[in-house]
Each structure stands twice: as structure tokens, then as C-alpha cells.
Amino acid sequence: MIYLLAFIHALLHLFDWYSTAVILKAGGYEENPIMVKLFNLNKSNVDKVMSVKFFIFAPLGYFIGEAVIYCLIILIAIYAKVAYHNWKSL
């Protein structure tokens, strides 16, 4: 079960990366103020920032989920909401 949840979490991160890149390159903007302030996320560095974010947080989902599976379910719910918002913005 943990492998499936970690895989879903990683897929949601990949979709977030893809959709954010498409939105920013089409002239949209990042609505998450943390990503803007902390990483200066914009269309010129979106791939670099999102790849670092993916390689840090996607595996983290596995380790958090292994310890406390409910935390991983909450992370999936949060990223499902992000993915849905980005899907509407594409």
C-alpha cells in the first residue's frame, strides 16, 4: 500500500511540475507565494526549481508515509488539490 501511495504522490509532483511550467511559459503566474519568494519561481527557472522540488519532496513522501501512512494520504490530498487547480488553469 505504501508503494502505491508513494507512486501517486510522485505522479502528482510530476504533474505539478509539468502544469506549472506550461502555465508560466504561457504567461501565467505562480499563485503560491512561498515558491515565488523562496525560489523566485518564474518562467526562466521553472524547470530547475521544480526538478529540485520533485527530487526532494517526492521521495520524502515515501519516508513520511512509511512512518505514518496518514501523513502521506494528507500530502496526496494536498497535491491532488494543486493538480486540480493547475488542470483548470491549463
Image (cartoon, rainbow, N blue to C red):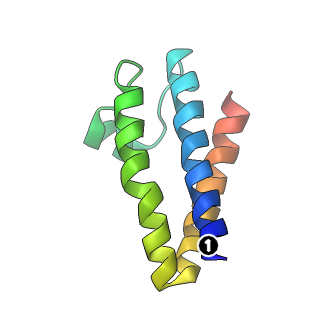
Q: What residue type is labelled 1?
A: Ile
Residue 49 occupies quadrant:
top left
Q: Which of 80 and 5 is in front in this view?
A: 5
Q: Nearer the viewer, residue 16 or 34?
A: 16
Mark 1 neighbour density, 10 Å: few (under 14) some (14–19) many (20 or more): some
Quarter of the image for residue 38 reads top left
Q: Where is residue 89 in the image (x, y as percent from the top left)?
A: 67, 31
Q: In which quarter of the image is residue 46?
A: top left
- What quarter of the picture does the N terminus occupy? bottom right
Whether 70 is drawn above or below 60: the answer is below
Residue, x 35% and y 47% (percent of image)?
Answer: 34
Label 1 SS? helix
Q: Which residue lies furthest to the top in this view?
A: 26
- Residue at image coords 52%, 77%: 71
Residue at 68% x, 27% y is: 90
Q: Where is residue 8 in the image (x, y as percent from the top left)?
A: 65, 58
Farthest bottom residue? 68
Q: Is residue 43 above or below residue 19?
A: above
Height in image: 22 above or below 55?
A: above
19 sits to left or right of 50: right
Q: Name the residue under label 1.
A: 73
